[in-house]
Image (cartoon, rainbow, N blue to C red):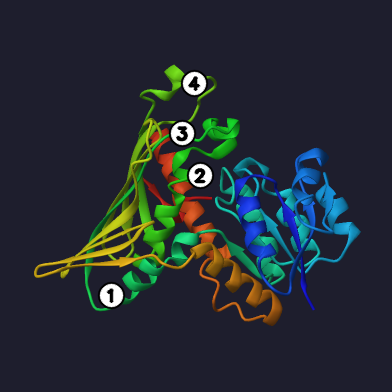
Amino acid sequence: MALKIGMIGTGWFADMHAKLLAGMEDVRIVSVCGSSLEKAERMAGRFAGTAAYASVHDMLDAEPLDAVYICVPPFAHGTIELALAERNIPFLVEKPLGVDLETPSTILQAVTERKLITSVGYHFRYMDGTTIAAELLKSRTPGMALGYWMGGMPGVYWWRKQDGSGGQFVEQTTHIVDLLRYLLGEVNEVYAVYGNRHMHTTEEDVTVPDVGTVTLRMKNGMVATVANTCMMPIGHTAGLHVYTDAGVLELGAGGLKEILADRTTEYKNRSNPYEAENRAFLHAVRTGDTSGIRSTYENAWKTQQVTVAANRSAESGLPVRLDTLT
């Protein structure tokens, strides 16, 4: 029997996931919920037999769902996840988990109490290059890492507002922080410095910093720096470089480059990480086997903790230890 899937959100990510789901066997998108009925109807119309709603509760009341995809802006999280947890409906939610730590912490408690199947859209974990890097690091000693997300400012209104997106480090660079955690372990302490250099002079209502750098102290003794900017007119680079006793691993959207003393080897990302992410989640929904999910809500909460700590450090001008963050 086909899995009945509900989609909450009508933007780019919702459309991307919906197209992937529509191409799978034994999966049906049966409902779409948008911020307006018009948006929901427009998206639902692209998939046969799909109903449209402007209320999450109306959608959940209308038909039993096997799972739900949540693709909404950071500020919109909270009520959606709690409603799904109350009904024990598994969900895949796109990152980040929110603009702060308070709302995700409330959701975490709810999904943990119900042992709910969850997945979070940290698709970098599913890249071919990430899998290879994780294997190579088993026999090497990493000393430090440098992460980057250097590009421009997305055009959606909520992204440029701190209370809408949480800022670039929370909304975008979170992928690099999560990759760091996945490959190299947990973070003890962060120290962040942000600045407003350009975007507030060219765009209206910009309250997010457009440059920033964060130093991270890892629990295993490593140190790392993750920097970002959204002030450029180009998308320049996004990735993580790991410096080890054997050489360098450079990981990005295109794949992995391994630089050793005697050779350089490139491993291209050939498979679609979004497809792998979806397959792992839907397999868990069907069977209860969650072993293929690389980022549960509980794990993603730890990435959210790091990015929120960075924001708090930038505000205070002081380092922030994660064990003091509530």
Label 1, on which residue?
136
Distance between mark 1 and mark 3 Cα atoms:
34 Å
Q: How far across and how far down the image is residue 170, in percent? A: 48, 45
Q: Secondary structure at mark 4?
A: loop
- Proximity of marks 3 and 4: CB atoms separated by less than 8 Å: yes
- Proximity of marks 1 and 4: CB atoms separated by less than 8 Å: no
- Proximity of marks 2 and 4: CB atoms separated by less than 8 Å: no
How packed is label 2: few (under 14 Cα within 10 Å), some, or many (20 or more)?
many
Of mark 3 and mark 2, the one earlier in the sequence is 3
Examine the image and state in which quarter residue 318 appears: top left
How packed is label 1: few (under 14 Cα within 10 Å), some, or many (20 or more)?
few
Distance between mark 1 and mark 4 Cα atoms:
44 Å
Of mark 1 and mark 3, the one earlier in the sequence is 1
Q: Residue at x 69, y 63 (%)?
A: 22
Distance between mark 2 and mark 4 Cα atoms:
19 Å
Residue 153's disc number = 3
Q: How far across and how far down the image is residue 109, in percent? A: 66, 61
Residue nearest the viewer, comparing 48 with 71: 48
Distance between mark 3 and mark 4 Cα atoms:
10 Å
Residue nearest the viewer, comparing 324 with 91: 91
Residue 171's disc number = 2
Q: How far across and how far down the image is residue 17, in percent? A: 63, 58
Label 4, on which residue?
203
User: In the displayed structure, does residue 66 sit left or right of residue 92?
Assistant: right
Q: Residue at x 62, y 81 (%)?
A: 289
Q: Residue placed farthest to the top in the image? A: 201
Q: Amino acid at mark 4?
A: Glu
- Proximity of marks 3 and 2: CB atoms separated by less than 8 Å: no
Of mark 3 and mark 4, the one earlier in the sequence is 3
Of mark 2 and mark 4, the one earlier in the sequence is 2
Of mark 2 and mark 1, the one earlier in the sequence is 1
